[in-house]
Image: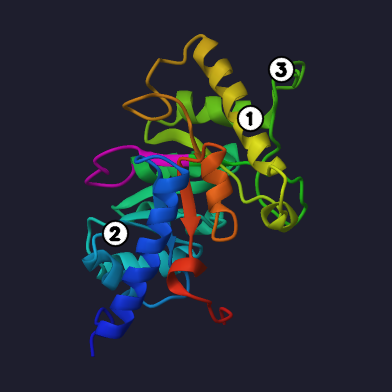
Amino acid sequence: MSSLQYTPERAAELKQNIEGVLAEVRSAGTEKSRLVAISKIKPSSDIMALYDAGHRHFGENYIQELSDKAKELPKDIQWHFVGNLQSNKVKLATAIPNLFALESLESIKKASLIETSLASISPPHPAPLNVFLQINTSSESNKQGIPPISSSTPLSPDVPEILALALHVVKECPHLRLLGLMTIGSFEASHAEGTRNPDFLRLVETRDTLEGILSSTEGVEKGSWGRKEEGGLELSMGMSADFKEALKEGSDNVRVGTSIFGSRPTKP
């Protein structure tokens, strides 16, 4: 049996699940809100079933798993990498021609490695690789990401880390496009009831502040960052437990796994 073959029963289950999530996305967000189905540790056959049902945006947490799946699945799938990309795995990531976005960029060093790797590929990718800067909005030591900023953050004498990284991507990395900001947020904030999620609010404020700085910075061309059509930085926030709240706070991109694929086994 091919690794891409699925049973009618599993296909019906997955289709029902994703249609339910999409309905909630549409009711809480906009027609342009993007649903990324996070398929980590799930078989390629699950992805194929959803592909045949019309879905195209999928995400993975482990770059080796994404690379393996990308080789056997249709080439018009738009992949999102949402995990920690180790420096020694950069070439593995840039070799994936249909990698739509790296959602976890957190350092200038990593950006430069990715830029160098993309510049060496022949034939080159048809478009710059979209990147989201990962922001640690909850200030948790066990989470990747750089600190958020606000309108009151001083810009000197030390340039905030997020601004330095954003300017490096926009000015020094022609093979990358700064598409937006991403956060994971804390478990407590995601599961609290009756209050607005402070992590989402911090990411919104960070986005607004960074947009204002980029728009007024000399040498940063208009249209060189953010969405190509409407402009502005996207927000990627919200997962299975809190994507509806994230959409209400303005998220453009939500990452949902368990609500679509079901619970996962522990990765060996």
Residue 55 has which mark? 2
Disc 3 residue type? Leu
Q: Name the residue nearer the viewer: 26 or 52.
A: 26
Q: Name the residue nearer the viewer: 231 or 114.
A: 231
Q: Secondary structure at mark 1?
A: helix
The N terminus, quarter of image: bottom left
The C terminus, quarter of image: bottom right
Q: Is residue 123 magenta?
A: yes
Residue range (magenta): 120-131
Label 3, label 2: how far apart the Cα atoms are: 42 Å
Label 3, label 1: how far apart the Cα atoms are: 13 Å
Query: Vertically, is 149 above or below 25?
Result: above
Q: Residues within 10 Å of mark 3 (few under 14, many from 20)?
A: few
Q: Residue 142 sits in which quadrant?
A: bottom right
Residue 155 has which mark? 3
From the top left corner, tell me how far across and down residue 113 is, in percent: 49, 44
Q: Name the residue nearer the viewer: 242 or 234.
A: 242
Disc 2 residue type? His
Q: Is residue 212 left or right of residue 100?
A: right
Determine which residue is flagged by label 1. Answer: 206
Residue 6 visible, this orientation:
no
Disc 1 residue type? Thr
From the top left corner, tell me how far across and down residue 151 is, in percent: 70, 19
From the top left corner, tell me how far across and down residue 17 is, in percent: 39, 68
